[in-house]
Amino acid sequence: MRPYDHPSRLILHEEVHARPPIPLWPNERVISQSFLLDASARKQQLQWVQRLSSALGCTPNRDDHSFMTLTLAPEPERVLVKWELHGEFATIAVIVHNKQKTNEPLLKSRLEIERELDSLFKSLGCSTISEAGGQRISALDLVFEHRPLISDAQEVSEIFNGNTVLGSYILSSKRAQLWTDLQLDQDGFISFFMPHDLLGSRQLGRVARALAEAETYRMVAMVSFPVAKSLSLPLREAESELAALSEKISQLQAESGVNTKNDGIFLEELSRLASRIEQWISGYGLRFTASEAYSQLLSKNLLELSESSIPGVQTLSEFMDRRFQPAMGTCIWTQRRLRELSDRISRTTQTLRTRIEFVNEEQTQKLLASMDQRARLQLRLQETVESLSVLVLTYYAVGLLAYIVKGGKEAGLDIHPEIIAAVAAPLIAIIFVVISRRRRHR
């Protein structure tokens, strides 16, 4: 790499090479299991892989430790373990040589393989796959066999205990077939039988990967389906409750006058309903979103198989379209109902809040008008009091002046107190009026 390269260029480039399929021999068997992980199980899986890799003297394929391919037994009887860590699940696939032709139900031979694998893990001082950690969400038994292709579904149904089978030609060359009954056997596995006319090793690896990922994505996507079904009735009740509240609020809008008590009750009910819906969205929204993404990945993997029909036999893609997609439609519709109900509650709450704000504004305007009227009344009263105070002050001032003038007359001055008081009274009144107006102006 050059100094002027983007710091993440190598990581971004290597992502296209992440988790490559393992080339398979013409007659091999892939036993793939996926486990849902919480924080504790994730840590347990990582420790299991580290112990196994240490026992075999191997190192991780990448720095992020997201996948490893380990050789438990060398060729010609090779036994490989491929471990992949995803966001919320991990996949452990064991690849073994298919020693004998398939002509009976696969459960018996697979149980023998599992016993041999358990012994091999214990000889290395490691736990078995079932003890690696997590809850198993999918398990597949993929059998690849180089043999002539099968034209009669009845012939292959014996491998699946006489069950009705799904089948198709796969890949554009139509040199391989896919057969399955898509039923869980006693050991919890779904069996797939793939006869082929000598496909390339990498083609076989890609088919195995597409089937394993498709089944895992199908099951992880379906985790949200019981949740969607359980929310059906509560959602219907919540929608009915919102419709009833909206009708009551509409009736309240048509009424004249103010009814703050009902407004408060309706707002409290809307808040309680909104809290319930948001709790559902927070608890299940991410699960529904993940299911939608997983269903798209399932469709992509089925498309990669390039199925073409065998006369009289339903293909795996057709079966999924008929059975799986309606379940995913229920999940997607439930998620949409949650979002739309949340939006409707928000709009209804906003309408009610607007009404409450309008009522509050109207009450505020009335209060301000009342306060303004009281202020005018107080001003008039004050002016009246000031006018009376001028008369009172003038009366006392003239009286005081009269006493002074009478004193001067008694002292021998030739003055008339009554005349002086009569002349001084209007002058004193004018002086007090001027003083009062100047004080009011200030």
Image: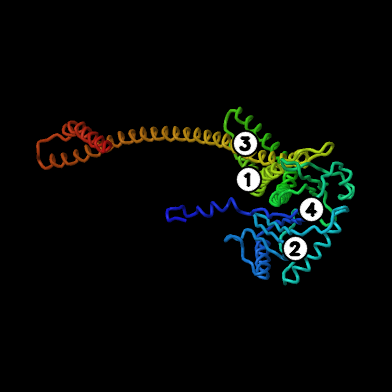
169 displayed left or right of 162: left
Q: Which SS class for mark 2? A: loop
Q: Is residue 223 visible?
A: no
The type of residue carrying mark 3 is Arg
Instruction: State which tag comes first along the sequence, 3 or 2.
Output: 2
Residue 408: percent from left, percent from top: 13, 41
**Is residue 278 placed above or below 395 in the rendered structure?**
below
Between 429 and 11, which is closer to the camera in this rendering? 11
Whichever of callouts 1 and 2 sits on the residue coming sooner in the sequence is: 2
For the residues marked 3 and 1, what is the alpha-carbon distance in whole angstroms?
12 Å
Query: Mark 1–mark 4 contact, CB under 8 Å?
Result: no
* Badge nearest the viewer, 4 or 2: 2
The numbered dot on residue 278 is: 1
Question: Could you tell me which residue is drawn at 64 percent across and 41 percent down?
Answer: 269
The residue furthest left is: 413
Say which amino acid is labelled 1.
Glu
- Residue 284 location (% of width, % of height): 67, 48
SS class of the residue under badge 1?
helix
Dot 3: element: helix
The residue labelled by disc 4 is 143
User: Which mark, by number, is residue 344?
Assistant: 3
Q: Residues within 10 Å of mark 4 (few under 14, many from 20)?
A: many
Sequence-first disc among 1 and 4: 4
In the depicted structure, whether residue 349 falls above or below residue 8: above
Q: Is residue 77 above or below residue 151?
A: below
Q: Which residue type does callout 2 highlight?
A: Pro
Of 16 and 391, which appears nearest the observer?
16
